[in-house]
Image: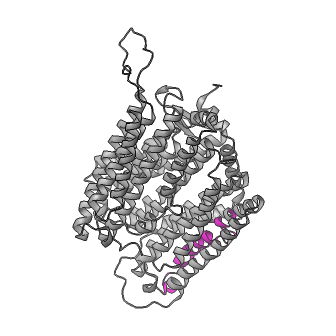
Amino acid sequence: MNTLLAICVGVLYSAAIYLILRRSIVKLVIGLVLLSNASNLLIFTASGLTREAPPLIPEGESMPAIVADPLAQALILTAIVIGFGVLAFAVVLIRRAYEVVEADDMDQMKGTDT
Amino acid sequence: MSTNTLIVLPLLIPLLAAALCLASWRSVLAQRLISLVAVLGLLAAAVALVHGIWQDGIAVLHLGNWKAPYGIVVVADLLGAIMVLLAAITATAIALYSLGSLERAPEQFGYYPLMHLLIAGVCGAFLTGDIFNLYVWFEVMLVASFALLILGGERAQMEGAIKYVTLNLVSSALFLAAIGLLYGLTGTLNMADLAVKLADHQDNPMVEVVAGLFLVAFGIKAGVFPLFFWLPASYHTPRIAVSSLFAGLLTKVGVYALFRTFSLMFPLDEFVLRPVLLAMAGATMLVGVLGAAAQFEFRRILSFHIISQIGYMVMALALFTPLALIGGIFYIIHHIIVKSNLFLVAGLTYRLGGSYELKALGGLYKRAPWLAVVFLIPAFSLAGLPPLSGFFGKFILIRAGVDAGSWALVTVALIVGLLTLYSMTKIWAEVFWKPAPSEADPGVPPPGSLMILPVAMLCVLTVAIGIGAEPVYRLSERTAAQLLDPSGYINAVLGDQP
């Protein structure tokens, strides 16, 4: 399972970087979506996978020997929320940029570079 | 109020101000009043915080009374407190300048709440003791800066913003990945606890990978070579008050994060990444200043100078001797004040000359001799002429470089100082000495007193730091000592645990 997830993370990162390097701004945003999800999945994998009990202990009982780590999942949840907000902004931004520049092409957005 | 509870004020005041400004969305007047009160309150709180920590040592607040390393802590050591004070000074100057310079439209579309949110993010990043919270505060700051950057919606702003947003999101993703790997490695997120646990992992190559990820992530935010390209593409596009706020604070949050991680969690003494940092510092200084030399637009020259100045700070960190860190902290104090001031001066020049292009400007020495004075003070300070603040910062740094035997880096630093002076005299000759290219009316209203006041205030501070360099040096000295000996920080956060 670890290996599978590691490959999955790698594929997501490479796909994200490929898309970010494309000229189209729509593909750029899709690349950013993949990039943030790749990082979330990486946290999930790196913090250790357990097949045992969930980290919920009924009142009066003691903790089972192995439970899943809840903190990593809390981190991912926070990161997903933040990523969602930021990406929503990015989508609005490329829409506005498309309206102003009238092109879906990074090569036509070089006015501020030189 | 004890220092430990005082720490939350720099977080609460801007957040509360942002919420109040949002609540009074329709009344620009109310938002202006709230902003003014909030920045002054923040300034007072920051002064009290620095004073308190100078007196009583590092202050720690365990949020919700959950003890570290399980709960989340807010920590203020001298470095964090000084950075908060600098943020408060910049915020006060920018708020005054905004009151005097902004048109109706940005004020009505949420300029003030965004400004406070940005300041809250910046202060949060300086004060948190938890690496994941650092990420969260970075994002608060970034989202606010995205919106401020495109406020106005011109084509140049959109083009700049796409690059700014993309590279900063890539940086955030790398930062998040590094946090994930670090958590997998050590099982903790508290920075003091991480410092303790990482000491047991010294032979693990994974630590170097994680440190490399942090270096790239913070390097993008700080704008070091070869990761700075978003900065000159976007910083000159928004309103000048926004540019100035970004120039003063945003990259310095990246620099602060580098100082914090590479002194506390990955001490640089014997670390593999040190030669990389040294090379980056030299290249950042040189590329930044050469970029500036090729530009003929006021704000773009200043943007490139931000990069070259970041190089000096990274140099201080990379040398990692006590004297170098003192110089680095002195340099940060000097740089934030001078850099925001220069952008504000560019705004004043625009109001008098009607352009940011050096070719289209001229003859301002005759028309406004006072502007020449308020330009020369920060400009010469940036170039490092005595007795202004920049001279002492550079002097300490170069002395530290000589002591450490890094001759190549010292040579680069001196050449860059000279080229900075060239760049500043270029602006001086074009904007002030050259006769005006046309007698036409600039077509913009002249600056009001509310725009001139913050510039004058920051000029006085620059001169004061230069003349009263010794107290600032002592402050930097104690800050550097805290950075070099992280045990004080660790004990303050973790208490008396072994």
Query: Which residue shows up at 55% across the image and 54% down it?
Result: B255
Using the rendered view, name the quadrant where residue A68 is placed: top left
Image side of residue B291 versus residue B395, left or right: left
Q: Which residues are magenta?
A: B363-392
Between residues B318 and B372, which one lies in front from this camera angle?
B318
Q: Is residue B433 magenta?
A: no
| Residue at the extreme top of the image, as rendered | A60
Please count the marks in the image: 0
Between residues B102 and B226, which one lies in front from this camera angle?
B226
**What colour scheme was applied to this rendering of the protein?**
one colour
Q: In this picture, is B293 found above or below B304?
A: below
Query: Which residue shows up at 67% across the image and 50% down it?
Result: B475
Task: Say if residue B114 shows up in the picture.
Answer: no
Q: Is residue B372 magenta?
A: yes
The quarter of the image holding the C terminus of chain A is bottom left
Between residues B282 and B480, which one lies in front from this camera angle?
B282
Q: In this picture, is B371 found above or below B484?
A: below
Q: Where does residue B406 sit, x and y in percent of width and height?
A: 73, 62
Task: Say if residue B490 shows up in the picture.
Answer: yes
Between residues A55 and B130, which one lies in front from this camera angle?
A55
Q: Where does residue A36 sit, x and y in percent of width and height?
A: 36, 47
